[in-house]
Image: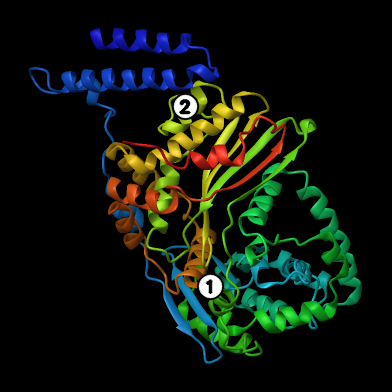
Amino acid sequence: IEYQTILVIDFAMARLIAPSRRFVQPFCYVSGRISRVFSSSTTAVQTAPGGPNEVFTKWTNPYPQTFSYVQEIAESATKVSTLPNGLRVATQTIPYATTATVGVWIDAGSRFENDENNGTAHFLEHLMFKGTSARNQGHLEVEIENLGAFLNAYTSREQTTYYAKVMQQDVPKVVEILSDMLQNSSLFDAKIESERHTILKEMKEVMKVPEEVLFDHLHATAFQHTPLSRTILGPAENVAAITKADINEYIKTHYTAPRMILVGTGAVNHDELVSLAEKSFSKLPTDPTTAKTIAEKNPSHFTGSEIRFRDDDLGMCHLAIAFEGASWTDPDSITLMVMQTMLGGWSKDHPAGVDVASKLGQRIAANSLAESYSAFNTNYNDTGLFGIQAVSPGGEHLEDLVWSIMYEVSGLIYGVDEDDVTRAKNELKSSLALHSEGTGPKAEEVGRQLLTYGRRMPKAELFARIDAITGDHIKAAANKFIHDKDIAIIAMGPCQFVPDYNWIRRRTFRNRF
């Protein structure tokens, strides 16, 4: 009863504190006091005469526990074969599955373009659905619908994917369709002109989504004058000028067998898929040049810089602050994943309200500094981006928001609570397990890992790597990526109260004596 009374009083005190600049830090001290009172009280309850109080420990525990995910990570092995032309075939059979996801993952994207043909990869993705020499667009659409299949594609900065979800008995047919699209696309002039107008309309729609524009601008300033600065859709003037010759040259250069992986997950048989691939993908170019070789010749470099677009009519200030992150194969890439989870995310409709696990989330929620925020960690072949993006109403409290972000991010350098690390690791593992359910996510996981790591990393290994991370690893990675490092900043909307670059850059470290 005594501990409950103290807790209620402290929460009442916390609510009395008005969210303003001068009270950002004191509120956190009150929160810390609540935490200490809660910790000491729960310890007293659990060590009371007669043993732990069953009412208190029956359903939960105030301290994060380490869980076993043996059942969740149990999965069949991924089989990989390489054909004579260099095409790799990878399968992961899911017991009792009656459907399958089959797709082709290609090590090609917008970073492999140049300033003149930027946008070609995305343009080509659209044209692949417009018919081949064997079937026109109408026949292709009817054939897919008759199978009850789902056919889709996407393009990123480093990868392009074409995939289909089908019933088990239709796997051979969809492999033949995918191979026909990738090797025999018709590329009629009329279709090129039609898609040109479609893509220009798509670009106008994308420009209406601030989150999409924010990260394009972030890449443009962080990797300026290097390959990763280019957008996936490309500039409008390029889209208006791309020709059939440009598209054919891109196919010849980048759609080669050694840079492709045929992936099948679910109700698939590895030997059968290999046999189908040998028959269907025999006409692919066999240029041995890899994406890694191209990236090494023309690497992307991070530049500390900022872009600000003041537009008071936008309503909300969209802000992103980023450090140079880790590449896919960097030893610290998984540590940064845990750090991202520790920083977390929050929005005004978050079911936990102000009681989120992340200290940054608590600080922002309690003082109403933003509508939402989230940490991000993006990996590429040779670099990455790690940081925070937030959406906040314009006003003087933007300085408090930036201060809070930099205080919590730089705080990872100097000390972390092992309970916070354990909690973040559990959350990360749960998220990875939940998001890999189904044949589609598994196919994406297999294809992406084979392109980035050169091998399939089993969940058991991934989870073991996560479990091995401690507070010391977090501090070491924070020292490497955050301490006194340059940052890239992008602010859009009513952003006049966002502090200047040097003010934010100064808060990548703390003066200590």
- Residue 240: percent from left, percent from top: 88, 65
Depth check: 214 or 159 in front? 214
Relative side of 342 to 117, left or right: left
Residue 162 seen in the figure? no
Q: Is residue 483 above or below residue 499?
A: below
Q: Which mark is residue 361?
A: none
Relative side of 253 to 353, left or right: right
What residue type is disc 2 on?
Answer: Arg
Q: Is residue 313 above or below residue 218?
A: above
Tag 2 residue: 363
Residue 139 seen in the figure? yes
Depth check: 94 or 195 in front? 195
Q: Is residue 83 above or below residue 457?
A: below
Q: Which residue is at a point 91% across and 72% down the rendered structure image?
A: 190
Q: CA distance from mark 1 to mark 2?
A: 44 Å
Task: Indicate which disc, 1 or 2, sits on the residue closer to the N terminus.
Answer: 1
Q: Residue furthest left?
A: 49
- Residue 128: percent from left, percent from top: 75, 72
What residue type is disc 1 on?
Answer: Val
Q: Which mark is residue 263?
A: 1
